[in-house]
Amino acid sequence: MTAFAEIDLSAPKFKPKLKNVLGKKLYKDFLKEHPEHKGLTLKEFKAIVVEFNGQLRETAINRRDGIALPERLGFIIVVKCDRALKSIDFDNSKKYKKLVSFRNLDSDDYLAKIAYTNYSVKYSFTHREIWKFQPVRQFRARVSKTFKDHYTKYFHLTKMNLLSDIYKKK
């Protein structure tokens, strides 16, 4: 094992500035595009969006094949893969003065990944290569909680098979 160097816990931390997309601007843009919903309040609009996103999240977790996003934006799927890096157990590393890593015995050392792909969409859209998917904290926490019990049902991604291979027509 390699030697372990202590970390300065009083050092300044980097915290990215968060941006809330679900706000008044999106609400006003929605009402411009769909004037038939002008009786909808901002609170109701937010509740509908949050409920819809929750249903997308649960469907992506419960279905092995993931979920196709509306408007042919791509697919979200939960997959399992091997650990590339070892997670460091800082308490025991500090105690034993050697690098000690955690063992993920709950899921046979597999990791859950929430993956997004738009590779195999039938009608590709403009600039599809620059789209990025960033799952919210609730989605990541829910996947983590369910993955321990159901990790065997998810596709196993390796270096040899790609995410887009799952959705290719046979």
Image (spheres, grey):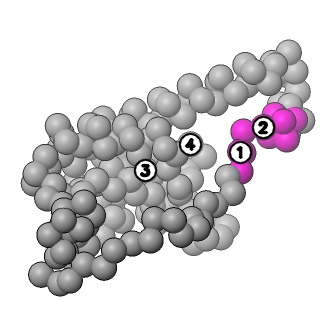
What residue is pinned by disc 3? 76
SS for dot 2? loop
Horizontally, residue 113 falls left or right of residue 92, namely right
SS for dot 1? loop
Question: Could you tell me the amino acid type at mark 3?
Answer: Ile
**Few, some or many C-alpha atoms within 10 Å of disc 2 (few <14, some 14-19, many ≥20)?**
few
Give the extent of the magenta segment: 19-28
Q: Residue at x 58, y 67 (%)?
A: 12
**Which residue lies most toward the top here?**
39
Whether the magenta-drawn stretch holds residue 140 is answered as no
Question: Could you tell me the amino acid type at mark 4?
Answer: Pro
| Label whose residue precedes the other's in the sequence (4 or 2) | 2
Q: Quadrant of residue 28?
A: top right
Q: Are marks 4 and 1 in contact (CB under 8 Å)?
A: no
Q: Height in image: 78 above or below 129?
A: above
Q: Using the image as rendered, state which of residue 4 and residue 107 is in the foreground.
A: 4
Question: Could you tell me the amino acid type at mark 2?
Answer: Gly
| Label whose residue precedes the other's in the sequence (1 or 3) | 1
SS for dot 3? strand
Q: Using the image as rendered, state which of residue 13 and residue 43 is in the foreground.
A: 13
| Label whose residue precedes the other's in the sequence (4 or 3) | 4
Rounded to the nearest angstrom, the CA distance separating label 4 from label 3 is 11 Å
Q: Residue at x 54, y 34 (%)?
A: 53
Residue 70's disc is: 4
Residue 156 visible at all: no
What residue is pinned by disc 1? 20
Q: Residue at x 37, y 37 (%)?
A: 142
Please state the total of marks drawn on the protein image.
4
